[in-house]
Image: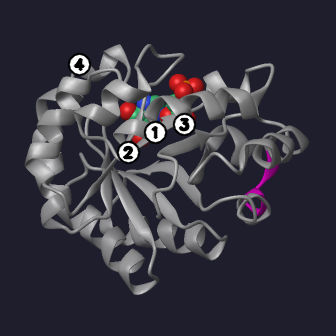
Amino acid sequence: MERKTGLILALDVTDRMEAVAISEKVSGYVDAIKIGYPLVLSTGMDMISQLSKYAPIIADFKVADIPNTNRLICEQVFKAGADAVIVQGFTGHDSLEAAVKLAKEQKKDIYVVTEMSHPGALDFMQQVGEGIAKMAADAKASGVVAPATRPERVAEIRKIIGNDLSIISPGVGAQGGSASDVIKAGADWVIVGRSIYQAEDPAMAAKKLVDEMKEFI
Ligand code: XMP
């Protein structure tokens, strides 16, 4: 994924026309559009190819299965037109490696969830986040997903993965994180949903974030 603006739209709307309209409005400000279960379950897998004309598509299915099933899922998602898939890391090295191997064969990307951005991530995930980051680096994944709500953790994760992997970071805006703070901490992209798609003027909201990050990108 090429970094031009540092912004990824999380498009968690559930209406096809709204999804297309928002994508059209913000396409000049985003490097990718992340879609997940809310949009795909309500509209269908063809939403991926429909939106891919506006930006590369990251499929946030948080894939978390045995190696063979991870491979089968990623195969279908790439076939549908996605450029990247988000997978969970807690399932272990073999599950991750199966997804990465397929992605590399198809010149696509896998991003691995380390610890999540919500408060409940402290219950279990944070304890294993650093180990997952190291595993993602060893597996040569394209990058990891790390929380904009905790820039200090993003900085820790950056130290572990070095500069070969990217960090994409959700939690800006509605969840309380700051775009410029997390970019300064070491993230390559911020992932922003509600603050853009619920804004009265989504393009203006996206532009504001891009302007805020500009000097740190
Ligand atoms: P909002 O509306 O909060 O949307 O800006 C954030 C988007 O990112 C997803 N999300 C995560 N995905 N690891 C992930 O892989 C995380 O820690 C995480 N936190 C939020 C969320 O589902 C939504 O699409």
Front tag of 4 and 3: 3
Colouring rule applied to residues: one colour
How would you classify the magenta stretch by its main secondary structure? helix
- Of the two numbered discs 2 and 4 in the rendering, the one whose residue sits closer to the viewer: 2
Choose top left, top right, bottom left or bottom right for residue 150. Answer: top left
Q: How dense is the environment of label 2, judged by Cα within 10 Å: few (below 14), some, or many (20 and up)?
A: some
Find out whether the residues at labels 1 and 2 contact each other: C-beta distance under 8 Å.
yes
Numbered disc 3: secondary structure: helix
Q: Is residue 55 above or below residue 90?
A: below
Bounds of the magenta segment: 43-47
Q: Name the residue carrying label 3.
A: 210
Residue beneath label 4, please? 122
> Looking at numbered disc 1 in the image, what kind of residue is underneath it?
Lys
User: In the picture shown, does residue 69 fall above or below 155?
Assistant: below
Q: Which residue is mark 1?
A: 214
10 Å crowding of disc 1: few (<14), some (14-19), many (20+): some
* Front-most of residues 67 and 8: 8
Q: Quick check: marks 1 and 3 in contact, CB under 8 Å? A: yes
The amino acid type of the residue labelled 3 equals Val
Residues under numbered marks 1 and 4 in contact, where contact means CB atoms less than 8 Å apart: no
- Please give the name of the residue rendered at 28% of the width and 64% of the height, measured from the top-left corner: 141
- What SS does tag 2 mark? loop
Residue 217 is labelled as 2
The residue carrying pointer 4 sits among few (fewer than 14), some (14 to 19) or many (20 or more) residues within 10 Å by Cα, namely few
SS at mark 1 in the image:
helix
Horizontal side of 130 relative to 45 (left or right) equals: left
- Disc 4 residue type? Leu
- The tag earlier along the polypeptide, 4 or 3, is 4
Q: Is mark 3 within 8 Å of ligand 1?
A: no
Residue 61 forms part of the magenta stretch? no
Residue 148 position, x and y percent, is 35, 27
Residue drawn 58% across the image and 53% down it: 32
